[in-house]
Image (spheres, coloured by chain):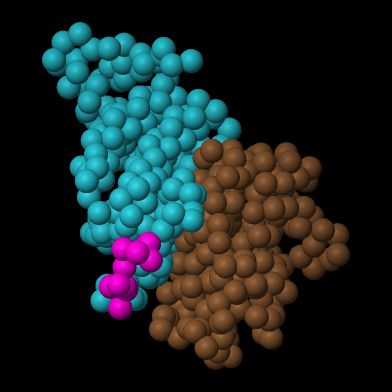
Chain colours: A cyan, B brown
Amino acid sequence: MNEGTATQPATKKGEETRDRILAAATDLIHQRGYKATGVAEIVAASGVPKGSFYFYFASKEELGRVLLQRYRERQREELARIFPEDAEAIPTIRGFFEGAVRMQADAGCKSGCLLGNLAAEITENEELRKELAGTLHDLQQALAGAVARGQARGELSTDFAPEAAADFFLSVFEGSILLAKARRDPQALEASLSMLARYLETLRSVAASNPPAGKEGRA
Amino acid sequence: MNEGTATQPATKKGEETRDRILAAATDLIHQRGYKATGVAEIVAASGVPKGSFYFYFASKEELGRVLLQRYRERQREELARIFPEDAEAIPTIRGFFEGAVRMQADAGCKSGCLLGNLAAEITENEELRKELAGTLHDLQQALAGAVARGQARGELSTDFAPEAAADFFLSVFEGSILLAKARRDPQALEASLSMLARYLETLRSVAASNPPAGKEGRA
């Protein structure tokens, strides 16, 4: 079912138009949600003629799919940057959260996480749900990879599964962004970060730690 | 701005009609979201004449507010039952999560948490956002209360704030329900529960524990 990436633009100008539509749609959907955003609004916000939309996208669902595919590609580059192979696990995982806290606080905690919002909103649409699940999977795998490498290098205790830890971290991430959004206040993110930092210290392998927990692990 | 609770039904029959509208609306909004649910659908699903809706509720927003107020009242009773004053903190907090895992798994992880969904969806509507934040606040306070009592009784270490721990737990709760929904799979909930159980063991006060961590705290 993955063929339908609509018309690939043949010209540079065509590509720019398509990018403009996608950028406007991403903003609107992030702020208002997928269902509440209409094609007419996307067209108006991107400043392209209405015909252009249907030249590049067969439908709004099509646009949603392409938008998520794009997001996933960019996220892959981001993840490679945030989770380099040779970086120590605990500071890397903390860094990932610290980045999220900063971003949400800067944005006034208004719009939350695009993926999290879509996960809450998209239930019946199986195509979009799968695309979304794939994007969340990449995020979970990046976290699991950092944990597994940390375990292999003897930084982390090995009595828990990297995948389970990654699910947990991702849950903390999405959940605290959601709470911050509902409250319009980054406090939930800061609290979660401090409790998570504390938890991470308890996951250090006993061998690796003459525990520096007191130094950086406390809330 | 809290006066507008529309018409209070004067008769038993009126109350039943209003309840029917609220029950149908709660189901639809839980499944499809607030924005995607129209008054016409609510009227159709509840089987009442359309005029009835506007007799009891001035608008869809009004209905949303009453629905959240109701949800909050019921949640208060639930929370009093789940978090009794004298119960030990760690098993109580675990029990809260175990209940959520069971409920979501039974429901095929399809609809997620009504509050979480609304938090993701409602951003611009300040009235509804505040109502929602209040309902989440009760949930957070129930968790914070369990932590504070556990600390006062010497069950839990006292080097972290009950409020921060509660924000963290609530984030894990909402985030893992969201992931389970995006994946249509309760695995994220189970993983989060096992990692949370492990974390809870590390929060035991050193005095209280000849640590039973090895027995029940491991994933």
Q: Residue at x 38, y 37 (%)?
A: A138
Secondary structure mainly formed by the magenta segment: loop
Residue A65 located left or right of residue B96: left
Determine which quarter of the picture holds residue B173. bottom right
> In the rendered image, is residue B209 in sight?
yes
Q: Which is nearer the eye, A107 or B58? A: A107
Q: Which is nearer the eye, A185 or A95? A: A95
The percent coordinates of residue A103 (x first, y second) are 25, 55
Q: Which is nearer the eye, A109 or A51? A: A109
The percent coordinates of residue A144 (x first, y second) are 39, 45
Q: Residue at x 45, y 67 (%)?
A: B168
The percent coordinates of residue A141 (x first, y second) are 39, 40
Query: What segment is highlighted magenta in the picture?
Result: A204-214
The count of marks equals 0
Q: Residue at x 55, y 77 (%)?
A: B211
A130 part of magenta stretch: no
Determine which quarter of the picture holds residue B3. bottom right
Residue found farthest to the right: B12
The percent coordinates of residue A14 (x first, y second) are 19, 15
Residue A158 located left or right of residue B67: left
Residue found farthest to the front: A207
Q: Which is nearer the eye, B207 or B20? A: B207
A207 part of magenta stretch: yes
Q: Residue at x 44, y 54 (%)?
A: A158
Residue found farthest to the top: A10
Q: Quadrant of the C terminus of chain A?
A: bottom left
> In the rendered image, is residue A117 in sight?
no
